[in-house]
Image (cartoon, rainbow, N blue to C red):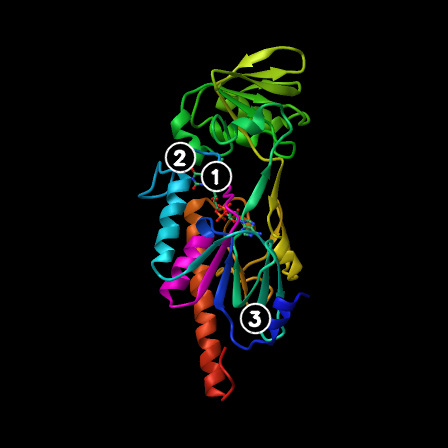
């Protein structure tokens, strides 16, 4: 433990009521409500939000079509208006300080003390290893019809089958276009039921492995198969092979995890409270299905719950004649 950390542990007063780790939609929303609750709050953000590759953000009421970067810049300006501190950087660890709070360490070697934590670090989409796919992610390789479906409606869709749910995405996006081809790629054979639904949806099926995507003038033009054929497509839908929660800090703190159909994620209650007293989590670090509005809403709940918990903890301490904070 370095000298700075020791000094922090010996100091009875905390620099911050709350440190929010991750300044995307969930984190900035938590910080906004904490700032408005007069809480000394720090947001540490590494600056890599999940939707950064997309030029536009859709489905966010009153901000539909705004760029993700502009949305987050507006959020940062709002939290600054309530005196919330924002630091660009990466949190590398957090540990209990033995006094009910936490010491948060940053990659630059600094350490910060806080009474409570909100972890909103998001996740990383680990993409199928198909040549050219990662480069087009969020542009014409898409993951979610609610985020992008309207913009590409009626275009020629290709869908790369997910190994565990091979038909699901193709069946879903068939609502947005009548021209859908499901590429089975490395998925096994379809169940009779899936085959019947694909048939009902008018989805054609291409067997065989996909080896790459064809691009001309910076636009997707086709899907290349191992047998040498190229199938013309202007849009590809693909799900991440794995959603890797950025949950290192939560694991270090010993937060309970839960098994979900999308992999292991931190277990939280309705307010985002984890199994570690004093630690909340919100947004995509708790699951891949939180879109921006959900992440904002969960961040809000976590911030409000954290504030209420601190307020009542301090009242209880005062009532019992114990030191506050
Ligand atoms: C291509 C694409 C397009 C999308 N389009 C839409 C859309 O149109 N509409 C919609 O509603 N949703 C969309 N989404 C989903 C959207 O990205 C998520 O809902 C949203 O990003 C979740 O917010 P979050 O705050 O949980 O995580 P993020 O936005 O990922 O933010 C997490 C932040 O924490 C930071 N961080 C991580 N680890 C650390 C650390 N250790 N220390 C400090 N900071 C850290 C990251 O750098 C990042 O800035 C899209 C997703 C993708 C992949």
SS state under label 1: loop
Q: Position of residue 273 (x, y in %)?
A: 53, 62
Magenta stretch holds residue 252: no
| Quarter of the N terminus within the rendering | bottom right
| Residue 298 in view of the camera | no
Q: Badges 1 and 3: C-beta atoms under 8 Å apart?
A: no
Q: Marks 1 and 3, Cα distance to the nearest angstrom?
A: 32 Å
Pick whichever of labels 2 and 3 is earlier in the sequence: 2
- Within 8 Å of ligand 1, the CB of disc 3? no
Q: Which residue is mark 2?
A: 56
Dot label at residue 51: 1
- The residue range painted magenta reads 27-50
> Vertical placement of 83 versus 285: above or below?
below
Magenta stretch holds residue 41: yes
Q: Nearer the viewer, residue 181 or 14?
A: 14
Report the mark closest to the observer, 2 or 3. Answer: 3
Q: Which residue is mark 3?
A: 101
SS state under label 3: loop
Give the residue at the far front of this rendering: 3
Give the residue at the far top of this rendering: 229
Q: Nearer the viewer, residue 58 or 78?
A: 78
> Vertical placement of 220 versus 268: above or below?
above
Q: Nearer the viewer, residue 216 or 2?
A: 2
- Within 8 Å of ligand 1, the CB of disc 1? yes
Q: Nearer the viewer, residue 246 or 107?
A: 107
Q: Marks 2 and 1, Cα distance to the nearest angstrom?
A: 9 Å
- Within 8 Å of ligand 1, the CB of disc 2? yes
Q: Marks 2 and 3, Cα distance to the nearest angstrom?
A: 39 Å
Q: Position of residue 213 (x, y in %)?
A: 57, 19
Give the residue at the far left of this rendering: 62
Q: Mark 3: few, some, or many residues within 10 Å (few <14, many ≥20)? A: many
- 148 left or right of 285 in image: left
């Amino acid at each position: 433990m370095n000298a700075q950390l020791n000094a922090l542990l010996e100091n009875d007063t905390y620099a911050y009521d709350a440190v929010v780790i991750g300044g995307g939609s969930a984190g900035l929303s938590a910080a906004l409500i904490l700032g408005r609750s007069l809480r000394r709050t720090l947001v540490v953000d590494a600056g890599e939000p999940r939707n950064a590759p997309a030029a536009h953000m859709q489905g966010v009421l009153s901000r539909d079509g705004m760029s993700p970067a502009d949305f987050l810049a507006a959020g940062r300006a709002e939290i600054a208006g309530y005196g919330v501190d924002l630091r660009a950087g990466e949190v590398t660890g957090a540990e209990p300080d033995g006094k009910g709070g936490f010491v948060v360490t940053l990659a630059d070697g600094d350490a910060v003390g806080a009474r409570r934590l909100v972890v909103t670090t998001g996740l990383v989409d680990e993409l199928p290893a198909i040549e050219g796919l990662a480069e087009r992610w969020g542009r014409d390789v898409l993951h979610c019809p609610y985020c992008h479906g309207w913009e590409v409606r009626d275009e020629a869709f290709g869908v790369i089958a997910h190994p565990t749910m091979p038909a699901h995405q193709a069946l879903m996006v068939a609502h947005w276009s009548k021209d859908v081809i499901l590429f089975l790629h490395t998925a096994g054979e379809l169940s009779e039921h899936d085959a019947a639904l694909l048939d009902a949806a008018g989805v054609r099926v291409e067997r065989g492995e996909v080896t790459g995507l064809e691009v001309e003038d910076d636009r997707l033009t086709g899907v290349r198969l191992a047998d040498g054929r190229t199938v013309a497509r202007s849009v590809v839908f693909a799900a991440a092979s794995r959603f890797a929660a950025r949950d290192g800090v939560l694991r270090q703190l010993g937060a309970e995890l839960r098994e979900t159909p999308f992999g292991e994620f931190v277990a939280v209650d309705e307010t985002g409270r984890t199994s570690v007293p004093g630690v909340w989590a919100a947004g995509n670090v708790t699951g891949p299905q939180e879109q921006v509005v959900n992440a904002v809403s969960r961040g809000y709940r976590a911030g409000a719950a954290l504030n209420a918990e601190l307020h009542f903890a301090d009242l209880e301490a005062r009532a019992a004649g114990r030191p506050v904070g």
